[in-house]
Amino acid sequence: MLRLRVFVFLLSIWSFTAFSQAKITVGDPYDVIDAQSKHYFTENGEIMTVKVDKKDVIIQKMSAKTLKFLKARVYDDFPKGFTLEQVLQFKDRYYLYYSLYEDKQEQLFARELDFAAGTFKGAAKKVLSITDKIDGGRIRGGIMTLAAYQSMISADKYNFYFSYDKSALIIQYRMIPETKRDSKSFDIIGMHVFDPSMKEKWGGKVTMPYTEKKMDNLDYSVDANGNVYLVARVYNDNTTDKKDDDDRANYKIEVMKIAAGTGKITSSKVDIADKFIQRFWLYETAQGPMIGAGYYNKGNSASSADGMILFKFNTDGRVTDMKTFEIPVDVLNQYVSNKTRRKNEKKEDDDEAEATNIILNDMNVQEDGSVILIGEQQYITTSTTRMGNSTRTTTTYHYNEILITKIDASGKLAWIQKLPKSQLGGLGQGGMSYRYLSGAGSHYVLFLDNEKNMNLPKDEVPARHMDGQGGFLVCYKLNDKTGEMKKTQILDTRDVQGMELFQFKPSRTLGTALNTLVFEAYKKKKEDVLVKVVLD
């Protein structure tokens, strides 16, 4: 898996001042490419897409300025049975990574792309060859996000993590244990660190110091020197109960540094007392120390959050700070029903009010050392109806409110904001969730919304947006220093210059130039178009 923060697009060239209007331009249509996986990149006023459909890989080039289709190249020379793992930008280079089981070996290949030419640069390079059997589809930190739930079918085997400056990439995987008993089995993790030319800096197998039953790995990170960092939940006994008899956490958080070259492990433990870690991410900072941050709660829920937790630790793995920041009840009570508001206020009397089903989706460690955390309420509901002698079960996917928090470089809570949103659909994520962009002293969150929510008071519940039924693309702009928000309605997907657009996904939105967004959408008649949004 690839954690989401890797693809936060830093809009250093953006400068939003007046934000009241948007100029919309629709390009000429071009032939649609139906593909199971689509990836978008932008550079020097051009767009490259990499679309993977079964055995074919299609590379397209388009102009972000004129919105014209330039060319496409189809590659059908990939080996039979290959599995797409990732398509990534690594510094100024681009790679498609795929895995292949062949000759009783697990193999990982990197095939480099030439952005300017819109082609591959020759054949793929084998970067890993593993004789041991490796596991696939592990959900990091035990939290089943909706995106992870939907990706389980592909069961990717490798995790990819970049250093802060993107000068190093760690590719991580887990060996299938010899014994299935967690109380007897020690995780063996493969770790390989590469530079942007995909030359291996170092790699090997690292045996964890505790049994699988004793520890849960929460996150990995790598620094520019190739040292790997691991944060884990280590239980105090063999019960794996997260709570002890005194309602304290029955585990400690342990930060392990795995030295480049040697694989030697040094560690530091943190007693979190009555704080229960939900999800936790590690990042290197521009200043050198590592930062770990995430959500915590005071119970045993895997998907609720009482607040944010932040660790700072030196490159030797020694923890120097631990701070927690509770979500204010007045924030929890924004955009909820009166019934929920009363429940929160009652729970707050016992210090138990919390955000439910909130999942950490994005983390942005800024150049000054401040941290932006973005969480989204995600959950699944099922309903069963009986029709005669048969039953039908319906699954509904919910992507709701967004919580965005800034912790400043000194470790203080700068601000916290809730963005109202209520999205649901029956076909997975689809066009739901959001896109986060940042730069020029502001943060931007884009998503499809119901028009009724344009001027929504904080004491009202947002109207639902149904996936697949059009929607209004909106953008929230948040001032980095103050957290002040401004909301703008950009366009109606059902009427963009007289054209209805389909299959819009926030993740396909690119920041291509000053004040400019470009995204691809389907217009029917087996044609796609590029849409450019220039914000004044």
Image: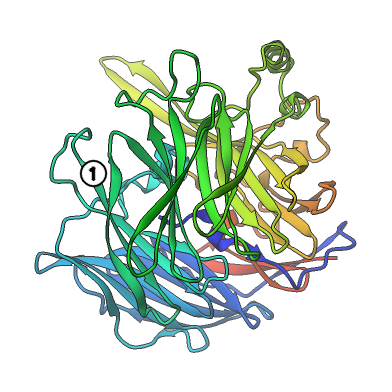
Where on the picture, by quarter, is residue 202? bottom left
Pointer 1 residue = 186
- Is 63 on the left or on the right of 112, as rendered? right
Residue 187 in the figure: left or right of residue 329: left
Name above or below for residue 280 compared with residue 236: below
Q: Can residue 431 be seen in this view?
A: no
Going 75% across and 73% down the picture, which residue do you hit? Answer: 13
**Res 210 visible:** yes
Q: In the rendered view, would you say 413 is above or below 204?
A: above
Residue 281 is situated, as x and y percent measured from the top left of the image, at 52, 48
| Residue drawn at the location 79% of the way across and 53% of the way down | 477
Which quarter of the rendering shows the C terminus? bottom right
Residue type highlighted by circle 1: Phe
> Toward which corner of the image does residue 190 lie, by quadrant?
bottom left
Q: Position of residue 59 (x, y in %)?
A: 43, 77
Q: Position of residue 85 (x, y in %)?
A: 35, 62
Rendered location of residue 107, percent (x, y): 22, 68
Element type at marker 1? Answer: strand
Residue at 44% across, 13% down: 245
